Amino acid sequence: MRAARPSVSAPAPRECEAYRDDRWDEMWDGELHMVPPPGLDHQDIVTGLAEFLHSECRRRSMGTVYVQAGVHDPEAPTRNYRIPDLSFVARGNEGVLQPRGIVGAADSVIEVRSPDDESRAKFPFYARLKVREVILIVARTRRPEVFRLEGERYVSVRPVRDGGLPAVVLGVRFRYFASRRGLRLEAADDATHQLEV
């Protein structure tokens, strides 16, 4: 098999900004990171989580969840941003919301992991902005991980006694069922409010 690699130069950030409407590409300190389109498992998880979390945010008047909104460094918003699958901005933190997206720290972000993605490599960026919670979910297995910001780094949150994995900022608990590759999301204040993906 032969492959051709055309010689192209990376577009300038201003050129990339013109195409932002339909792209998930990210800018990391001026370096373009091109992200392949998400697979169907990935999209199913994001859609389910977004619907559930939107409903919970309304029910508890706790803030707003955004799907694929850019999280921008306020010091270089066009040259340094990441696009998590979901971002949560708590009530009282609306000052970070601008027409381009979230400029500054979201309160929590969710990254659904696909093979060879850069979700974990985004941690230093999120920590510098002071994103309080990062949630990773592996698309293929649906296994969740929750990380809480302590100082300047993230620490892994351990399951509580009943086996639930708390995401305190979002006010939810994840339950993972390895035997059937299932993931249940429950409201922390009322476990009858739940979603299985």
Image (cartoon, helix red, strand yellow):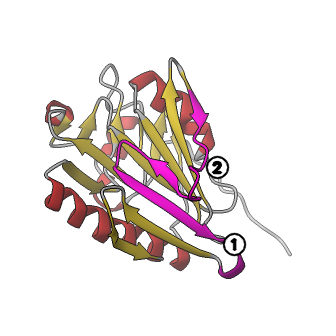
> What secondary structure is found at the residue carrying circle 2?
loop
Q: Which residue is mark 2?
A: 7
Residue furthest front in the image:
161
Reply yes or no: does residue 64 show up in magenta.
Answer: no
Instruction: Please identify, in this view, whether the residue under mark 2 or under mark 1 is nearer the observer.
Output: 1
Q: Which residue is mark 1?
A: 178
Vertical arrangement, residue 193 with respect to residue 64, above or below: below
User: Identity of the amino acid at label 2?
Assistant: Ser
Between 34 and 65, the one nearer to me in the picture: 65
Vertical arrangement, residue 115 with respect to residue 87, above or below: below
Between 23 and 43, the one nearer to me in the picture: 43
Mark 1 neighbour class, 10 Å CA radius: few under 14, some 14 to 19, many 20 or more: few
Image coordinates for residue 65, horizontal then vertical, percent = 26, 54
Between 154 and 116, the one nearer to me in the picture: 154
Residue furthest right in the image:
1
User: Identity of the amino acid at label 1?
Assistant: Ala
Residue furthest bottom in the image:
180
Q: CA distance from mark 2 to mark 1?
A: 45 Å
Q: Residue at x 26, y 39 (%)?
A: 102
**Occupied quadrant, residue 99:** top left
Number of numbered tags placed on the structure image: 2
| In this rendering, position of residue 126 left or right of residue 177 | left
Mark 2 neighbour class, 10 Å CA radius: few under 14, some 14 to 19, many 20 or more: few
Instruction: Tell me whether the residue at label 2 lies in contact with that at label 1, contact meaning CB atoms closer than 8 angstroms.
Output: no
Q: Residue at x 38, y 36 (%)?
A: 13
Q: Which residues are magenta?
A: 154-180
Image coordinates for residue 71, horizontal then vertical, percent = 35, 39
Image coordinates for residue 1, horizontal then vertical, percent = 86, 75
| In this rendering, position of residue 99 left or right of residue 111 | left
